[in-house]
Image (cartoon, helix red, strand yellow):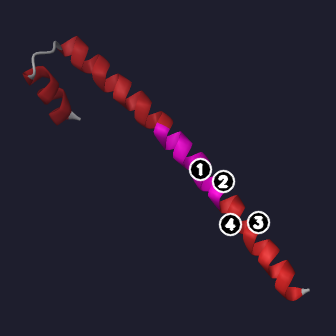
Amino acid sequence: MATVDDSVKAAGASGDKAAEMLANCDRAFADIRSDLKLLKWMQGATLVGIVALILRVFLN
């Protein structure tokens, strides 16, 4: 993150503005990570359901 901070400062933003921008990015990435975890669980549950239905069809 130091390189991003240096880049923002080199672009002319103040230190406080750079810190605020980095904090906003961290929050956005945290939201994306939590959404991806939920989607992975949903995909796993769907896969288990499909496999169960396929097994039920072929084993009966």
Side (left or right) of 10 relative to 50? left
Q: How crowded is mark 4: few (under 14 residues within 10 Å), some or many (20 or more)?
A: few
Q: Residues within 10 Å of mark 2 (few under 14, many from 20)?
A: few
Q: What type is the residue that disc 4 sits on?
A: Leu
Q: How crowded is mark 1: few (under 14 residues within 10 Å), some or many (20 or more)?
A: few
* Residue occupied by mark 1: 39
* Residue occupied by mark 2: 42
**Magenta-drawn segment:** 32-43
Spatial CA span between label 3 and label 4 = 5 Å
Spatial CA span between label 3 and label 2 = 11 Å
Q: Is residue 49 magenta?
A: no
Labels 3 and 4 touching (C-beta < 8 A) = yes
Q: In this view, does 6 lie above or below 16?
A: below
Q: Which residue is nearer to you in this view: 46 or 38?
A: 46
Helix, strand or loop at disc 4? helix
Q: In this view, does 21 lie above or below 51?
A: above
Which numbered disc covers residue 49? Answer: 3
Furthest residue toward bottom: 59
Which numbered disc covers residue 47? Answer: 4
Residue 56 in picture, x, y percent from top left: 86, 79
Q: What type is the residue that disc 3 sits on?
A: Gly
Residue ID at (29%, 21%): 21
